[in-house]
């Protein structure tokens, strides 16, 4: 019960701060106070507005906010977000542009399950929606999943991806962003051995920890410093009585958020104090840069305890993917079995989460894949976020990824037989060159 109590204590703290913000805003906004303007009341109102919004967003799943899309015909078409596969721990959804012809590129975007919702990739989806049929993994908040649905660990995650790929068919191109990169690689290898006809055409891995030890970062150092017992004792709690998942062991989103914020506490503190002063001066708006960023950043979700712990132990500590020793249901998944799926890795030179060297390790593991179907790209000056959603993604990486997809859109078996090594310009290169 102490874990339920601590979970509910965190929720109580969040709820109290939301209430304090709302109360301060309401109190300082009484019309009678306008008779004698007081800067202190203006500041209280601004503090209340920012505080209420901040703590309210922590338990709200953000909306995709993609309602219409302007196509080549110059008309705005509605975008319907359709669920095509519904599962307990995550759905496969399709961004269906009404009235538009089906696009030749079918892309499965694998979103991270690392504290934030799939909406973190909103700008990535928008950029691909221009000329692609976009599908994405929409993972559920563990606190809303009843205990009766059972466990969900890295093996279950991998099998979910296998099912999603099988559903979409072999003409799919998969793009995995950050955390799911090693498990997406494993899911592709699983299909290569179990059901080769269902393999995707190409696989693009963006900033993922395929080999965390290749280039250590603060994230990998933390994983190596603490023991699994310490993690379980300090990070894992039981969902409280307020949610459907009551009693489920989770790594709470609020606890994750406190870790995120503490890494750059001074920067976040200044951002909120500056926002309060902008509200005081009347310069803030509902969708200004601060609110757009923090509405998404503060929206966190719980992860199942078994998924978090198995990720740390098997992916980071034991490096099962990096050593090609990963197993699913007791059977080894041999990454060397990938022989026809073209694989590309993308890294940011300034990525401090998945540093350069961690993701490109995937190409070394694909021993059965010819060099002509391997490629890598190192984006100069780009950090972790920029390689999938920032300017670097829009201007440089997205065109390269789409070119890679187009070059590998034919029948993979025929392409593998007739492929010839190709020279790739700039810093996109084959494994042999790297």
Image (tube, rainbow, N blue to C red):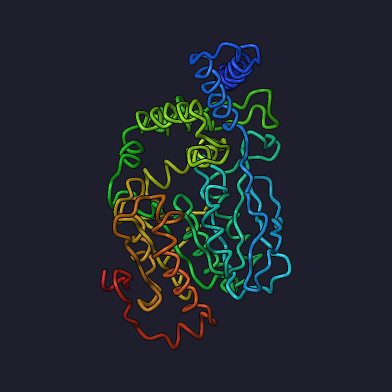
In this rendered view, identify the residue nearer to me: 98 or 2: 98
Residue 312 against residue 263 in the figure, above or below: below
Q: Quadrant of residue 99?
A: bottom right
Seen at 34% across and 56% down, the residue is 348
Q: Quadrant of the C terminus?
A: bottom left
Q: Quadrant of residue 403?
A: bottom left
Q: Position of residue 377 (x, y in %)?
A: 34, 65
Residue 413 against residue 271 in the figure, above or below: below
Q: Position of residue 67 (x, y in %)?
A: 67, 54
Question: Does 42 sit left or right of 101 as displayed?
Answer: left
Seen at 36% across and 66% down, the residue is 363
Question: Does 392 sit left or right of 299 as displayed?
Answer: left
In this rendered view, identify the residue nearer to me: 64 or 177: 64
Residue 60 against residue 55 in the figure, above or below: below
Can you see residue 1? Answer: no
Can you see residue 370? Answer: yes
In this rendered view, identify the residue nearer to me: 363 or 267: 267
Looking at the image, which residue sits at the far front?
Answer: 35
Seen at 45% across and 86% down, the residue is 417
In this rendered view, identify the residue nearer to me: 359 or 2: 359
Looking at the image, which residue sits at the far bottom?
Answer: 418
Q: Position of residue 217 (x, y in %)?
A: 30, 43
Residue 46 against residue 191 in the figure, above or below: above
Question: Does 116 sit left or right of 213 as displayed?
Answer: right
Q: Quadrant of the N terminus?
A: top right
> Could you tell me how many numbered marks the image carries?
0
Seen at 36% across and 55% down, the residue is 322
């Amino acid at each position: 019960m102490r874990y339920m109590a601590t979970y509910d204590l965190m929720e109580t703290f969040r709820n109290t701060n939301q209430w304090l913000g709302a109360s301060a805003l309401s109190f300082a906004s009484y019309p009678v106070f306008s008779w004698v303007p007081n800067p202190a009341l203006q500041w209280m109102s601004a503090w209340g507005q920012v505080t209420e919004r901040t703590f309210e967003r922590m338990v709200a799943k953000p909306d995709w906010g993609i309602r219409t899309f302007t196509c080549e015909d110059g008309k705005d078409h509605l975008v319907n977000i359709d669920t095509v596969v519904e599962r307990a721990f995550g759905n496969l959804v399709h961004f269906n542009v009404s009235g538009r012809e089906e696009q030749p590129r079918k892309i499965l975007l694998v979103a991270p399950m690392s504290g934030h919702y799939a909406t973190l990739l909103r700008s990535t989806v928008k950029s691909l929606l221009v000329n692609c049929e976009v599908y994405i993994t929409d993972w559920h908040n563990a606190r809303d999943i009843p205990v009766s649905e059972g466990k969900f660990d890295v093996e279950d995650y991998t099998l979910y991806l296998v099912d999603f790929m099988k559903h979409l068919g072999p003409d799919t191109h998969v793009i995995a962003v950050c955390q799911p990169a090693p498990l997406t690689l494993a899911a592709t290898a699983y299909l290569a051995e179990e059901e080769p006809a269902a393999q995707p055409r190409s696989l693009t891995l963006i900033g993922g920890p395929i080999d965390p030890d290749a280039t250590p970062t603060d994230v990998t150092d933390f994983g190596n410093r603490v023991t699994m017992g310490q993690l379980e004792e300090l990070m894992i709690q039981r969902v409280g009585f307020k949610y459907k998942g009551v009693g489920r062991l989770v790594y709470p989103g609020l606890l994750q958020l406190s870790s995120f914020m503490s890494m750059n506490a001074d920067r976040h503190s200044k951002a909120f104090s500056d926002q309060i002063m902008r509200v005081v001066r009347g310069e803030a708006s509902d969708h200004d840069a601060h609110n757009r960023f923090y509405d998404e950043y503060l929206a966190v979700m719980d992860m199942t305890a078994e998924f978090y712990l198995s990720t740390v132990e098997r992916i980071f500590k034991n490096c099962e993917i990096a050593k090609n020793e990963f197993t699913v249901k007791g059977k080894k998944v041999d990454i060397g079995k990938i022989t026809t799926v073209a694989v590309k890795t993308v890294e940011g030179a300034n990525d401090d989460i998945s540093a350069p060297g961690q993701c490109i390790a995937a190409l070394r593991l694909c021993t059965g894949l010819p060099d002509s179907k391997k490629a890598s790209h190192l984006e100069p000056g780009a950090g972790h976020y920029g390689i999938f959603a920032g300017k670097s993604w829009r201007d440089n990486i997205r065109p390269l990824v789409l070119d890679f997809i187009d070059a590998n859109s034919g029948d993979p078996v025929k392409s593998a037989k007739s492929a010839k090594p190709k020279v790739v310009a700039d810093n996109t290169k084959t494994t042999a060159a790297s």
